Amino acid sequence: MSERISQILAQMATLEADLITAVHAQESKMAFEIKGKKVEFESSVKAAHRKLKMNFFRWVVGYRPQNLLTGPIIYGMIFPLMLLDVCISFYQWSCFPIYGITKVRRSDYLVYDRGQLQYLNFIEKFHCTYCEYGNGLMAYMREILARTEAYFCPIKHAKKVIGTHARYNQFLAYGDATDYEARLEAFRVSLGKLK
């Protein structure tokens, strides 16, 4: 990897850390505190949230009909998602120890906290839980597959790829065969040291 690319990647990492700090600073203005898995709002915020909560019947009347029509399609996807969850978790559980790859912590990706928001009615909380599961599962799966790709084939594509995972930028340049086996082994060893 060229020195210029390494510098840009380091700048990106610094900017990402700055962004996380800025987002956390903004979130602290919302007057909540995280205590374990529970999110605690100040009592004044809780009271304001409860006032904003839409009554279920008013919510149903104002709900978009197309959402009701497509609901069975959306929620029918829970079965393939759960099957995917079982399969990818089994793959990681059975193969990562053999490869020496640090396992991906599921709880880092599947986070369920929107149900604690007092301004959402029970249907809205149900929708949020479904989306938290689906998107969290995809992020969890992506990291498992990213570690797998880094283990077996840490080589960039010749063509531009949209939406690459975080590990992709560290991969070897397409067509760069210099010390390939040694660099591949270095990738493999590093995957066992992940936190």
Image (spheres, rainbow, N blue to C red):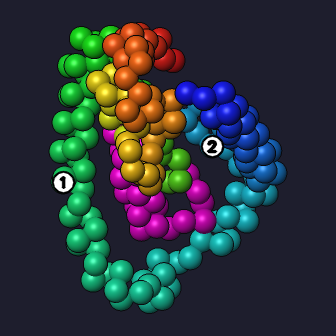
Residue in view at x 41 percent, y 18 percent: 178
**Picture disc at residue 39:** 2
Which quadrant is the N terminus positioned in? top right
- Residue type highlighted by circle 2: Val
The answer, for residue 42, to whether it is visible in the render is: no
Q: Nearer the viewer, residue 15 or 187?
A: 187
- Residue type highlighted by circle 1: Phe
Q: Residue 104: x percent and y percent?
A: 40, 26
Q: Residues within 10 Å of mark 2 (few under 14, many from 20)?
A: few
Residue 26 colored in magenta in the image: no
Q: Residue 98: x percent and y percent?
A: 24, 11
Magenta segment: 116-141
Mark 2 vs mark 1, CA separation in Å: 29 Å
Q: Main secondary structure of the magenta part?
A: helix
Q: Nearer the viewer, residue 13 or 159?
A: 159
Kindly identify which residue carries mark 1: 79
Mark 2 or 1, nearer chain start: 2
